[in-house]
Each structure stands twice: as C-alpha cells, then as structure tokens.
Amino acid sequence: MPGSELYEKFMALHTRDGGLVMPNAWDGLSALMLADTGFEAIATSSAAIAATLGRLDGRHEVTREEHLERARLLSSLTGLPVNGDFEDGYGDTPEDVAATVEAAVDSGLAGIGVEDTSGDPEKPIRDFDEAVSRVRSAVAAAKGRIVVTGRTDNFIQGRPDLDDTILRLTAFAEVGADVVYAPFPPDLDALVAIVTAVAPTPVNVLVSPSDNVLTVAELQQAGVKRISLGPMLYTHAMGAVDEAAKALLAGDLASATTGMSFARVNELLARGVS
C-alpha cells in the first residue's frame, strides 16, 4: 500500500468516534496473537524490543536498523498498520530524525513516534526549541506518508511540569504532528487539560494516568483518541514466565508448563501473511 494511502487508513482510526486501542507487540508471535484477536493496528515497543535483546531502553542501545527490522516483521506477518515507537528518532540532529522517518516510510510503517528524550541520564529531556525542531523535521520528511506522533517524556523523566508538557505538545501539534503524547500524566484532570489544550489533534495515552488505571470507555470519555500499552503486555507475559520459573525451581512441573499449547502457536504462525 503506498505511503499516502496507509497514512489515510491509519489516521482514519484516530479521527473516528472512539479512536483506537493500539497494543504493542515485540515479536512475530505476539503480533499475530494481537491480529488474531481483532486489533486493527499495532505498535512496536522500544522497551520490549530492547529487553528481548538484553539491553536497556532509551539509551541508544538498540539501533535504528534493528528496530526497523522488527517493525517490518510485525507488518509483514500481520498486514496491519504498524506504529514505530522510535525513541528520539535515532539521531543527534533534526536531519538524523528526518532520515529515520524516510527509513520508516521505506519500510512500510504506518506511524512513527519522536520523543524529546536525549538518551543522556544526566539530561534526559531535550531543550524546548531542540525538541520542537526535531518534530518539525519529522513532519517535513513524512510528507503525508506516515503518521507522526510528537511525544514528551516529562512525566516519566522526573519533570512533573504540566504547563511545560502542554507547551511542548501544543508546539508539536503546531508544527504538524498528527498525534501528541505524554506518558503517564498524574491524574485525569491533567489528562483532560492536555486533550483540551491540543484539540483537535488526537492524543495518545499509555494505559492511563499514573494514579489510576481507567477503562477504555473512561479514557474515550476524556477525549483520548489512541490508547497504547508500551511494554505492559510484554511485562505481563514475562511475569507469567517468572512465576513458572519459580514453580519449576520448587519442583512443580504442572504449574510451570501451563499456558498456550504449541498447536495454537503453530496455528497462529501459519496465518502469517508474509
């Protein structure tokens, strides 16, 4: 599907009544499970992909090509629109971000996120002007071929400043971001303030505000247009592995070997469209 058609298809999911729930996959089987369940679009998770490789998220330990390769796999297996959770755009300069967007378009992705993170633990959030410049560069490179999400990580990087968050998200929308996103606002009031400030630009939410996990219907009532899960499905699955490992160590083979049958695994793999 040409980029412009894929863009229109993916954006239509954001602008319809209710928007969409967009869970994050990390490998071929997880993507196929989500597609089989009936989700209309999926995303990568930079944190989950990093974890599968034994690396830390947000520290430039996963390369652009490694992430693109995983995203292409999810897309080719499912045929669904795939949104790339691409950290800071994989580069030091706005030109690097633009190159990442071009690579994502060439890889057939439907969307791409660009954060204001830096990968530097000493100064994890980029300055305002630099952050806006990078989103502007992403939008210019996208040319209506891929949905661009502008994201600020203030709340998860120890900067609980709602005013600055709204300022950044508003600026991202003003330079053309199709969707904006601030993971884990402190509460529902803060979330509603964000949705109101950037309207009509669609807002993505990672699960819920940090103080309370809401229902999909409650988030939709607040005006949210896209709900993602980040690494949460991955950590849920790894929690099951953790419990099984403990049971196995204790000698409980029955508890350690419950779960999906391998026949079901093969059934899902046989449905891959690639």
Image: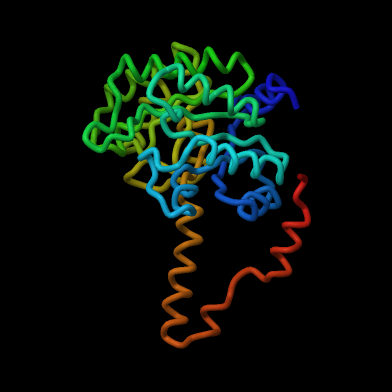
**35 sits to left or right of 160:** right
**255 sits to left or right of 10:** left
Determine the residue positioned at 54% across, 24% down: 101
197 and 120: which is toward the camera: 120
Query: Could you tell me which quadrant the C terminus lies in?
Result: top right
Query: Could you tell me which quadrant the N terminus lies in?
Result: top right
Tell me where residue 107 appears, x and y as whole percent.
64, 31
270 and 229: which is toward the camera: 270
Tell me where residue 124 appears, x and y as whole percent.
28, 33
**Residue 118 sits in which quadrant?**
top left
Tell me where residue 208 appears, x and y as whole percent.
42, 42
Tell me where residue 111 appears, x and y as whole percent.
58, 29
**Residue 116 sits in which quadrant?**
top left
Q: Is residue 25 above or below residue 89?
A: below
62 and 77: which is toward the camera: 62
Determine the residue positioned at 48% across, 40% down: 218
Q: Is residue 242 above or below residue 53?
A: below
Which residue ends up furthest to the left in the rendered image? 122
